[in-house]
Amino acid sequence: MQRPEVSVVIPTRNRPELVVRAVRSALAQTVPDIEVVVVIDGPDPATVEALRALGDERVRPVELPASGGAPNARNRGVDHAQADWVAFLDDDDEWLPEKLATQLERARSSGVSLPIVGSRLYMRTPRAELIMPRRVPAPGEPISEYLAVRHGLFHGDGFIQTSTIMAPTALLRKVPFADGLRRLQELDWTLRSLQEEGVDLIYAEEPLVIWYADENRPRISFDAPWKQSLEWLQQTRPRVTPRAYAALAMSVVGSMAAASRSPRVFFDLLREARRHGKPSFTDYVTFLQVWLVPAGPRRVVRDFFLSRERRTRTDVG
């Protein structure tokens, strides 16, 4: 096989049916010169056999001797990548056929030497299908604010998800994913990468990925204790604006910490956001919401209102 144009990296473990669906969506890309590096995160004979049964030489399984988590698996996939570009795909997501072609065109026309290319996506839950993010970054908008700041009660206008990311292989080798970080992995990697010279984040406006959310399936990326996420945020403070810092503390870390039901944790997070950030009225309302309303009902309400908003926009269009 000739040298591929894009290396697709898919971490997986003990989910052969799902990973085969993801791999098929990669193989169906309109860009034919690709390789699909499936990193099997620990011993998993069923997945090895399922990938072998596909019978496509573009699929390259990489078996790790022990489980190291999603960030480590992605890094090992990048180590094996032969192309100048790497695109990530989680094993429970799918790509639309034009995904890589669209992103390669955006990268080539961006004028950026090391572009990180994201895209919008379809988020499918048991109740609704939503398009995220609502918009792409505005010219001159701080990326940390685009990715963190909410302008409504349910999620921010900006968003990045691992299965949407395509980036230069050289950048990923210089700035690997953070081993041991169990949440906020793509956000952490994006913010650290943007500190490098010549790097910028650009988006394809088309939804190019199907993200299956709220499926109650075990994932390689396990839910993290909120304390680890707060420590991450404190270390990340130099990379974000005060406005973004407050939003991350109150909405992202706050939603994880709310399960503690601890008044002390509530006020500690509130003080952290006020001391180092600039909270808005929306941040305060969001913070109260995540502490007072359980996650399940919040998701139901979110899906109802955002689905109605999408239908309204479609009808107007």
Image (cartoon, rainbow, N blue to C red):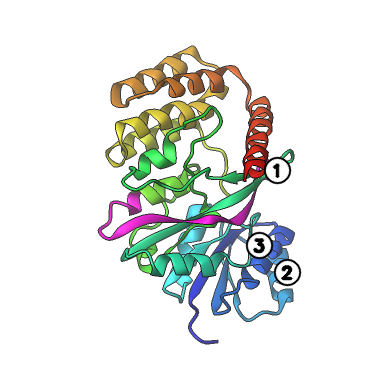
**C-alpha gap between disc 1 and disc 2:** 22 Å
Please name the amino acid that badge 1 sits on: Glu
Question: In the rendered image, which residue does mark 2 sit on?
Answer: 50
Question: In the rendered image, which residue does mark 1 sit on?
Answer: 215
Horizontal and vertical percent position of residue 124: 68, 46
Q: Residue at x 50, y 71 (%)?
A: 7
Q: Is residue 150 above or below residue 187?
A: above
**Which of the two labelled residues, at mark 3 and mark 1, occupies the earlier sequence position?**
3
Q: Is residue 227 above or below residue 222?
A: above
Please name the amino acid that badge 2 sits on: Ala
Please tell me in which quadrant of the rendered image residue 284 appears.
top left
Q: Residue 251: within the magenta?
A: no
Horizontal and vertical percent position of residue 233: 37, 35
Please tell me in which quadrant of the rendered image residue 19 appears.
bottom right
Query: Does residue 260 appear in this view?
Result: no
Nearest to viewer (mark 3 / mark 2)? 3
Horizontal and vertical percent position of residue 257: 51, 25
Q: Residue 206: within the magenta?
A: yes
Tag 3 secondary structure:
helix
Q: Which residues are magenta?
A: 192-217
Residue found at the far front of this picture: 316
